[in-house]
Image: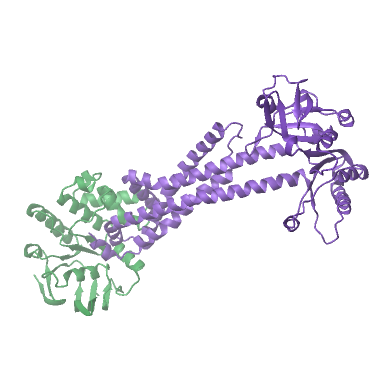
Amino acid sequence: MSLIELSHIAKHYTMGDQTVKALDDVSLSIAANEFIGFIGASGSGKSTMMNILGCLDSPTLGEYYLNGTDVAQLPESRLAEIRNKEIGFIFQSFNLLPRASALQNVMQPLIYRGFSLATRKTLAIEALEKVGLDTRANHLPNELSGGQRQRVAIARALVTRPSILLADEPTGNLDSQTTKDIMALFDQLHKEGQTIIMVTHEPEIAAHCLRTVTMKDGKVLRDQHA
Amino acid sequence: MHSFIESFRSAILSIRAHGFRSFLTTLGIVIGVASVIAVVSVVQGLSYSINSEFENLGSNTLTVRAHTPLKEALKGKIAKITLQDYQDIKERINDIDAITPIVTGFGKIREVKFGSQIEVSNVIGTNSNYRSVNSLYMSEGRFLTFSDEKKRRRVAVIGQSLITTLSLPESPIGEYIQVGGEWFKIIGVTESKGEIFGIDQDNILFIPFSTIQSLIGRQSSFQMDIQLSLTNLDSLTPVQKRISNILRTNHDLAPEQPDDFKIQTAEQLRSSFTSIIDSITIVLGGIVSISLLVGGIGIMNIMLVSVTERTREIGICKAIGAKRHHILLQFLIESVVLSLFGGLIGILIGFGLGSFAAAIIPNFPAANVPLWAIAVAFGFSAAIGVLFGIIPAAKAANLKPIDALRYE
């Protein structure tokens, strides 16, 4: 059984008396240790795809098996658990907590696991070491550069040892040199066995992915392996 | 448990991050709690001093006074304790240790004059037993005696205040003053009794019972109270019963008619005072509690602002696995900490205000903050934190992660 199994997933929004189909009958399966990129123009449904894969949103129709469990219609509290344990989010705008230091940001997801402070600290420092930022652990996000912030965010995503790393335009706010560094980090994580799902509209980023899924009007247009 | 500590830490952090705003928010609670504590401490101080006043009146003392039921009062009737009642009680009841009539002067008999100074005073006609029944002490001279009473002497015992208001010499024994137009010789000065409810207890003058009778005149009837102390505390109830029988017979009351008098023990007198004080406490406390309510609304308002400001943060926390209760707890703790902090400062300020008020009002008893008032103020502010924090906290907790993350 593959890690992710989507079958006939649809997401409909009602706007006035019109129904917008953000996702329209998408079936897809993703195996462990894949490095997959969703590409497409804005409005193609790739962000909705991301939200559903990340359990931030529930599909209107269809089934979503993650590690063998159907998560499509789970209540919010169960989804919170799944987000905490199975999924590591990386956002375009980093989304770090502004008043918490890098270390505290990385420790944050572990709070919801009920880990003790000592355990949280050990795991968080380990994750920061992995992204090469253990020396700046006590800095606040606004004291860090864009690339460093995104590394903190990656460390935060990794610290829970999730099944999938979900990155939404991870380099959208970064300059070209930093983009290269961050993408190198993703390549390395993939080599270590991490499953990575990425949404992007930049072809050079998509080039790192071993599989690209092109979306259009809520449907899968192309699904190709590199 | 770890997540609870973290919620607490994060609440403190965000209160400190908006130091001035948090301070202004708690100010409502500070003012509310401070005024509750100040009012309660002053009123309770008053009650404490009244209670100690009543301790002078022994527990084996009975007071008989006229009481007109409302229905009768509406018909224009006024109940009276008469001289006949006094004599009957005195002669027909055995267990009495000391009995004293108390007649309060009225009209012209309230005017006390020395030289050109005229003062309206509380003129009381009584006998030598008054002093022992009421634990009255002399600072100078002597009290009324049996022979003053018997010989209808024109002698007066005065309270401390009259020395100053009438410009009497410092040692006024032997001076002559006029009461109700008649000359009286001062034979004694009583010890100071202070004030109750701001009423001077030392603006008082005692003359013999027989003398006040002659001042009033035989024709006009007068208002009289009777105080008596018993030889034996066990006979309290039977004596009360017998006095009641005598008075009902004397006043020609039919069996269905209510008593037109009250026979009260010192304990009953005190509890009626205490119940007055308690109502004052509740009414004043209630009024100032409104400011607590206003303070609570202030907290709710700022918490709602805070939730809106931090919508994105809430979204991030939810995306990385925060459940509903994690977010709820964090905001709830924040509002409870805010209001408890305000409560704590309020208690301190309130106590200070109460003590200050008691100190600057002359003769006012010291402020007394009962422990229950502190507990109530503390509990109340915690409750306000929960009550007014729950709506903003629930609002935060119920945000959909996807909407919260998109919030700009």
Figure colour of chain A:
green
Q: Is residue B378 above or below residue B165?
A: below
Q: Nearer the viewer, residue B359 or B131?
A: B131
Q: Nearer the viewer, residue A42 or B347?
A: B347
How far across and how far down the image is residue B87, in percent? 89, 42
Q: Which chain is purple?
A: B
How far across and how far down the image is residue B342, in percent? 44, 45
- B291 sits left or right of A106 in the view: right
How far across and how far down the image is residue B407, in percent? 24, 61
Residue B241 visible from this viewpoint: yes
Can you say which quadrant of the picture contains the C terminus of chain B?
Answer: bottom left
Q: Is residue B201 above or below residue B279?
A: above
Q: How is the image coloured?
A: by chain
- B314 sits left or right of B228 in the view: left
For image coordinates 66% across by 24% down, the residue present is B164
Can you say which quadrant of the picture contains the N terminus of chain B?
Answer: bottom left
Residue B369 visible from this viewpoint: no
Q: How many marks?
A: 0
Q: Nearer the viewer, residue A108 or B285?
A: B285
- A183 sits left or right of B83 in the view: left
For image coordinates 50% across by 40% down, the residue present is B350
Based on the displayed image, in which of its 4 quarters is residue B157 positioned?
top right
Q: Is residue B350 above or below residue B7?
A: above
How far across and how far down the image is residue B177, in percent? 75, 25
